[in-house]
Image: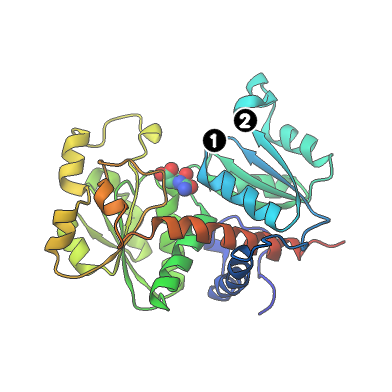
Amino acid sequence: MSTLSVDHLLGIKYLKAEDIQLIFETADHFKEIINRPIKKVPSLRDITIANLFFENSTRTKLSFEIAQKRLSADVINFSASQSSVKKGETLIDTVNNILSMKVDMVVMRHPTPGAAAFLQQHVDARIINAGDGAHEHPTQALLDTYSIKEKFGTIKGKNVVIVGDILHSRVALSNIFALQLLGAQVMVCGPKSLIPKYIRELGVIVETDLKKALQWCDVANMLRVQNERMEVSYFPSVREYTQQYGLNKELLDSIGKEIVIMHPGPINRGVEITSEVADSKQAIILDQVENGVAIRMAVTYLLASKIES
Ligand code: NCD
């Protein structure tokens, strides 16, 4: 396969295993390029990309922007907090105004689930979902699975546990879809109140005991508790959460095998993971960030190659 089966990246749910394979192969190529002294290629010189962030972001926004610049695309950035959205403009109006400026591709993060799909139905540009509420965050899942593949050579047959706030996490859902598509077994682990009931229907194992989950897995992906998405208290106190679901060195040493630790960031050090573990050799957190640029270059490049000139 030399082209993606989709015209937009709205979610992992819409991809085939071959799409992910193609994205990985393309990312391998770009990873080699970004480690050269001259990191830039002229591939997207005629393409203009708008990054629309209606929600806060550090890593994802920077990563997309670096990826686009490495491909020589023209980039415009938009943050909701500095825009007319605050003056009551609708999403479609905001975006149509931007598209009148002849934008070919939109990367959007939005707090509403389904926002990227809605946008795709209304505007004539390639859309990349950079996170839509608690729904999907496809490029995060692609860089996570790419990092697992880089570590083990394969994803098939690996046991991966996603730990923490599954209920509010778009990273969890996209990772579940991607890992299953690539043949991994997926477990989620956390307090019952943070695990949605429908999750078992996705063929995911549910475990509430962190030690048992760690003994089962090859990889543990630690998630942040997303307080900003919570209107009520889902657990008694942060201290209690950390006692039951925080990953520390002592616990890690007690399972009798070496596992790989991941985290999508931002890390709440001392809550879901101690600094000692986050900064240890077993953690591949900074590899994930590096791979994020190569993955976003690959996705951008592959979608741009489908734009009719
Ligand atoms: C995640 C997100 O925004 O969904 N972070 C990220 O994109 N690197 C996870 C989080 O906010 O905890």
Q: Residue at x 26, y 31 (%)?
A: 233
**To which quarter of the image does residue 194 belong?**
top left
**To which quarter of the image does residue 237 belong?**
top left
Residue occupied by mark 2? 80
- Specify whether 161 is left or right of 173: left
Quadrant in which the C terminus is drawn: bottom right
Which one is nearer the viewer's eye here, 251 or 225?
251
Q: Is mark 1 within 8 Å of ligand 1?
A: yes
**To which quarter of the image does residue 285 belong?**
bottom left
Can you give x and y, in whole percent of width and height, for residue 308 in the image?
A: 84, 62
Which one is nearer the viewer's eye here, 153 or 299?
153
The residue carrying pointer 1 sits among few (fewer than 14), some (14 to 19) or many (20 or more) residues within 10 Å by Cα, namely some
Residue occupied by mark 1? 55
> Tag 2, which secondary structure?
helix
- Specify whether 1 is left or right of 236: right
Quadrant in which the N terminus is drawn: bottom right
